[in-house]
Image: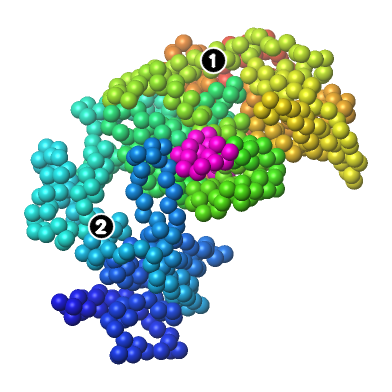
Amino acid sequence: MEECSKKKLEDSYSSFNVVEDNHFEEIEDTRSAKKEWEPKTGMVFDSFDNLVQFYRSYGNKMGFEVIIRSSKKGDDGEVKYATLTCSCTGKSSSNSRNAFKMHPMTKTDCKARIGASVRFDGKWQICSVVFNHNHELCSPDKTRYFKSNRIMHPSLKRKFEVNDRAKARTRPNKNFNSLLVEAAEAEDLPLVQKDCENYIEKVRRLRLGAGDASAIQKYFLKMQNENSNFFYIMDLDEEGLLKNVLWVDARSRVAFKEFGDVVTFDTTYLTNKYDMPFCAFVGVDHHGHSILFGCGLISNEDTETFVWLFQSWLACMLNCAPKAIITDQDKTMQNAIEIVFPGIRHRWCLWHIMKKLPEKLRGYSEYEYIKFSLQNAVYDSLTREEFEEHWNSLCDKHNLQDNHWLLRLYNERQRWVPAFVKDSFWAGMSTTQRSESMHAFFDGYVNSKTTIKQFMEQYENALRDKVEKEREADFKSFKSWIPCISTYAIEKQFQDVYTIAKFKEFQQELAAKLYCELSSFNEIDSYTEFIIEEDVMVGETHRRVPFVVCFYEATCDVRCNCRLFEFRGILCRHAIVVLIRKQISNIPEKYILRRWRKNINRCYTKVKISYNSWSTNLEGQRFDQLSNLFSTVANLASNNEDDCNMVIEMMNDMKNKLMSNESVGGIDKRLNMSANSRTNCESIAGTSKDVES
């Protein structure tokens, strides 16, 4: 039996194509068979996969599971060094809150491992080997239970699905038992019953209830009939079953052009009994309200599914990607974003991360102090250097260097720590709670038991209410105002142009000037550096925090290291102190953002949508008429460069004339333009006929 086992092992290793350097001494015949199976320093492999297969096969024979512990990439992005270890590496820590219901431990801080690196010729060479384990090894016949050995081959997947369908949703254990009978011995199966159950449950998620697929199709066709710019796409499996679906209404597509610079994406809200996550692309409008940029129902939350979803959504938005996106801390989302949106600023939801503190750190005896210190480091660090100092002090004091969750967070600190992300514009959105507020909005119409058919029926009602609330906020900002609290001209300037919600935010900063005091200033070359001290409430005590504001006299630029304007688009209290000190009565236009203005005619409000009572909107009807004519002219003129240049020249003349009429004529002129709108349309229609002829 022993000779037979050796022969099987040797045959299995013959496929790895192991190459040894000339300087590596040949194995002596007197060495035991075990020595022939062992990894040795100097061994060379054609690829990293071959190296992993070799060490895993060795681990199976010896009775331990192999994992990829760490790897390092070179400047070209390719992996150059890797460490493969026993799965018992690392230290165990219990997160259970109940001392009488502890979870099983597997970590023993085992040091058994190999280290390997890429050679100049692209092959992998073992650099170091550690053999000793500090735990008992299992017998080789039990290694099939290792997660890395439980492989679901395509043929098995197909068999599970066929059995599940043929036997009218039989219980997964019966499905597995039928496979067990065919195999004769459980040891011959490359998986366990739990794997079967998990896969069957996953497959069943793709199935819809009676009438659901028809309801989805009817709703999409109805919406496209109302407006051809309604976008939808369905992802089907090889048998034609629905896997994923994305839809974006015409209004949302145009609204994305106004407010799509920052988007949050979230999948944590389940809207139907089929356990298909409802995902939403959400932004923020000029009132600070959530605005929808697209919805989807997905069957899985893996990288492949997210890549399909993001690519489909990007195509819908004419390949115009947002500048920044917020998601929760999910590796599969991160991978998909790096593939579909390369170079985009991606940050994690801070709220979701801090919510995990009890789960990840409750096992430490000084948990409460650790939590307080961690929150202090995250929220109170004004600069990156301060955060680094607080974080390192926390880890050193409580020996947290080996906590893998904290280590990963630290390595990705540029994705979530305020001190590292506040230099980019996020429209004031610090978490994916923007998406969650959208979900709270849908909660009035659907619940966890709602079918997809019912959801499609209620979706339109929900969006109608959303549009109505936006219109009401527009009306209030146009018809009413918030009184000024000071006599400063800059406050009146913002009162005149900002929506009520955004003016309130500026006013809060102006009021907070009360807690700020100019400490000192210093003339430095082309700018003046001001030190503004603010009284900040920490717990029950006040603390004086200094902020640095740089003011450039020539350009009237003002920059504060709190970065509130960069982050939220609202001037901070520290900058306001300096502007008032410099007697600036007229804020430069660059500090008055277009996206917060109330006096902008935004195109998406004119888009025809079924839930917008469009038949009563004369302005919208005229907009549709013009859009159709413009589309016809563009199709005809784009075939010939001379025709194209002629139309461009005519359109520019019309645009300049209309803009001149708008600015000079005032209200009476605009009323006259409305009365003559049919004439303008007929003129454009005539242009279309001329080009066609």
Residue 291, position as x, y percentages in the image: 51, 26
Kind of residue indicated by mark 2: Tyr
Disc 1 marks a residue whose amino acid type is Arg
Residue 382 belongs to magenta span: no
Q: Quadrant of the N terminus?
A: bottom left
Give the left or right position of residue 186, taking residue 359 as reference. left
In the rendered structure, find residue 544 and report the number of the disc placed on it: none
- Reply above or below: 88 against 484: below
**Is residue 534 shown to the viewer in this render?**
yes
Please name the residue that numbered disc 1 is placed on.
471
Classify mark 1: helix, strand or loop.
helix
Residue 354 higher or lower than 456, as above or below: below
Please give the name of the residue rendered at 89% of the width and 37% of the height, measured from the top-left corner. Answer: 521
Residue under numbered circle 2: 145
Image coordinates of residue 665 in percent, x first then y, are 71, 14
Q: CA distance from mark 2 to mark 1?
A: 60 Å
Q: Is residue 687 above or below residue 392?
A: above
